C-alpha cells in the first residue's frame, strides 16, 4: 500500500471518529435547552454559540492554511 493511501485511510478513520464525537457532543449540548430542567438566559446561549462558532472558524482555517497549529480554547460562563 502506498504511503499516501495509508495516510488517507488514517485521516478518514481518525477524522471520521472525531467528527462523530463533535456531533454527539453537540446533540448532548442541545439537551441543555430543556427549560423544564435548566435555567439559562439568551445571553448564556449567545456566549456558548459565539465560543463554538469561533472555534469552528479556527478549525476551518487550519484546513485552509499550512499552519495547522492547535489553539486550545476553554469555555466558562
Image: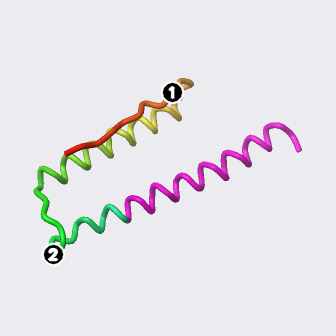
Kind of element beneath mark 2: loop
**Which residue is painted at 18% across and 72% down in the image?**
37
The magenta segment is 1-27
For marks 1 and 2, the one nearer the N-term is: 2
In the shown orientation, is residue 9 left or right of residue 19? right
In percent of width and height, residue 62 lies at 49, 32
Whether residue 61 is situated above or below residue 31 in the rendered picture: above
Q: Is residue 10 magenta?
A: yes
User: Which residue is the extreme one toward the right?
Assistant: 1
Q: How is the image coloured?
A: rainbow
Q: Give the main secondary structure, helix, strand or loop, of the magenta stretch.
A: helix
**Which residue is painted at 45% across and 38% down in the image?**
59
**Which residue is painted at 13% across and 59% down in the image?**
40
- Where is mark 2, residue-wise? 36
Q: Which mark is residue 69?
A: 1
Kind of element beneath mark 1: loop
In percent of width and height, residue 54 lies at 32, 38
In which quadrant of the rendered view does residue 72 lie?
top left
User: Which residue is the extreme one toward the bottom?
Assistant: 36
Whether residue 16 is situated above or below residue 67 in the rendered picture: below
Q: Which mark is residue 52?
A: none
In the shown orientation, is residue 72 left or right of residue 17? left
In which quadrant of the rendered view does residue 22 lie?
bottom left
Amino acid at each position: 500500500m502506498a504511503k499516501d493511501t495509508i495516510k488517507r485511510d488514517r485521516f478518514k478513520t481518525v477524522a471520521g471518529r472525531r467528527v462523530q464525537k463533535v456531533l454527539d457532543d453537540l446533540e448532548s449540548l442541545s439537551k441543555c435547552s430543556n427549560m423544564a430542567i435548566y435555567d439559562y438566559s439568551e445571553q448564556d446561549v449567545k456566549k456558548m454559540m459565539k465560543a463554538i462558532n469561533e472555534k469552528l472558524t479556527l478549525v476551518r482555517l487550519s484546513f485552509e492554511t499550512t499552519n495547522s497549529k492547535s489553539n486550545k480554547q476553554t469555555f466558562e460562563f
